[in-house]
Structures are given as structure tokens and as C-alpha cells.
Image (tube, rainbow, N blue to C red):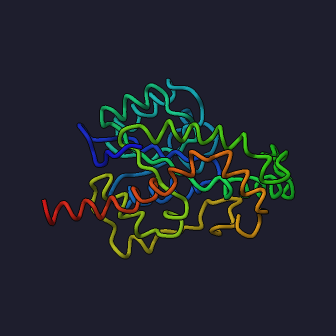
Amino acid sequence: MSTQTGAAAGAPSLYFSFGVTKTGSTLAYRMTRHFLECRGHSQALLPDHLQVIRKDLNSWSQANHELLEEIAEWVSARGIFLALKTHRAPTKFVRVMLREGRAMGHATFRDPREIALSLVDHGRESQQRGLDPIRFRDLNDATDSLDLIERQLAVFNRWENLPLIETWYYDDFAFNPDLTFDKLAHQTGLKPLSSAERASFDGTAGTKFNKAVQHRWKSELTDEESAEFKIQFSDFYKQLWLRRLSWRSRPLAKAARKVFG
């Protein structure tokens, strides 16, 4: 897990907001975008030829490093720091940008049991709404998603080991916005948000298919189902609290260095 924070050599131009599916990735992206906007970095939408899927947010959704290079050039030419949402694995170009300090970012994660329940919700609700295509329609119960989650966490592992990438746990950033905004200030080196700037963030905008409830697995999974997840993702659970402790303590550690350094 990366322990590097702050701007490295040169000014970063892209902030990669990566998220495992159903880990509050849209919320994390919007919090980052709000923070950067408040710090004077326009988060205007990319031009149409650089947009891929959604028109209401800036995303990189294809395994196309040429497109990402175009996006980076467009952003750099405008001298802004742009948040870019993605579910993709990091490419060689991403790794180079991070190593050179021309980008930074975060990778969101969550208890796999909570991811599974949210995936099932998504499939059911999209069917009820008559959406097309209907994603996750074949997930009838939480354990149907084990293989999908395993693939997603493999991508997360690739992100978290990159320089200048922080790991964000859903239960922390989704329910503690003040700490999250402080985290962004610490990571980017930009001025912390004022009380008014914090209060102006709408945490409900743009989120989909997410009940925003903690520890649903305790009431919605059987002991046998929960145990199956603990076995399937045993390595992940071993590291879970270490990842969370790293995220929550790092801003405090920086303050301590200022006092005692």
C-alpha cells in the first residue's frame, strides 16, 4: 500500500478517482471535484470528443491510453487540476504520470459483503425501472457476485500500490465528509475548505442504487453466507483495518510532524 502523499515533482494536472464498483465511487469523485472547484480549479466537463460514457461527469472508461493522453494534454494546457473518475485498471501512461508527480488520486474500497448486497440492489432496481442495459441482472443473491468482486479487488490492488494513490474506505469517507475534505487538503497540499465550503457540498447528488447504510451484512446475510465471503477474501480482510488506520491517521501524523519535527 502506498504511503506517499502530497504533490511530487511538478504540478499535478489529473486526480484519478478510481473505485471498485459499488464502493461509493461517484460520491468520492464528487467530493474530490467539489474540493478542487473550491480551490479554484475548474471542473468543467471535457469536450465531447474526449467523453466516453456519461456526460454529467468526467470519466475515463476505456482501456485506451491514447484517449487518456489526449485528456491529460487538454487539462495541462488549461493549467487546471481535474478529477477524473474511472473503474479501469491503471495503464502504463497512468503509472508514468503518477511516478512523475503529474497526477495523484485515490482508490475506494469496501467490505465485499456490502459490495455484494449493493450489486444485487442495483440489478433488481434497474429491472424495476426498466433500464437498458440492465447491469447485474444475473445476481440473485450476494454469493453470486463472488467472482465479480474478486476481479474488481484485483484491480484495486493494482491501484493501491502506485505512488500518490490513497485508499479510501467507504464507511470512512461516506459518513465523515469533514475528515475526507481534510484528507484531500493534506494529499494535494491545497488550502483546507472553510466551513461554508464544506456545508455547500450536496452528498446526495449523483449517487445511484446505494442505500448508504453501514453494516447491512449483519442483518441481510446469513452466518453461512458471511463466512463464505470471509473465506473467499481472507487476504483482503486481513489488510482491511490496516488500510483504514492508514487513511484515518495520516492527516494527524502530518500535524504531529509539524509540532515535533
Residue 211 location (% of width, % of height) = 69, 66
Q: Quadrant of the N terminus?
A: top left
- In the figure, is residue 157 to the left or right of 254? right
The percent position of residue 105, horizontal first and vertical second, equals 42, 45
Question: Image check: 223 left or right of 6?
Answer: right
Q: Nearer the viewer, residue 9 or 168?
A: 168
Q: Residue furthest left?
A: 261
Instruction: Give the quadrant of the C terminus.
Output: bottom left
Observer-nearest residue: 186 or 35? 186
* Residue at x 57%, y 52% (from the top left corner): 237
Q: How many marks?
A: 0
Residue at 53% in and 51% down: 238
**Is 220 displayed left or right of 84 in the figure?**
right
Whether 58 is drawn above or below 94: the answer is: below
Give the image quarter of residue 253.
bottom left
Q: Whole-percent x and y of residue 97?
A: 37, 32
The quarter of the picture where residue 245 lies is: bottom left
Q: Quadrant of residue 11?
A: top left
Judging depth in this view, the residue of 210 and 143 nearest the camera is: 143
Q: Position of residue 70 (x, y in %)?
A: 45, 29
Q: Which residue occupies the foreground of this view, 217 or 225?
A: 225
Tell me the residue at 25%/59% (across/down): 254
The residue at 76%/55% (across/down) is 122
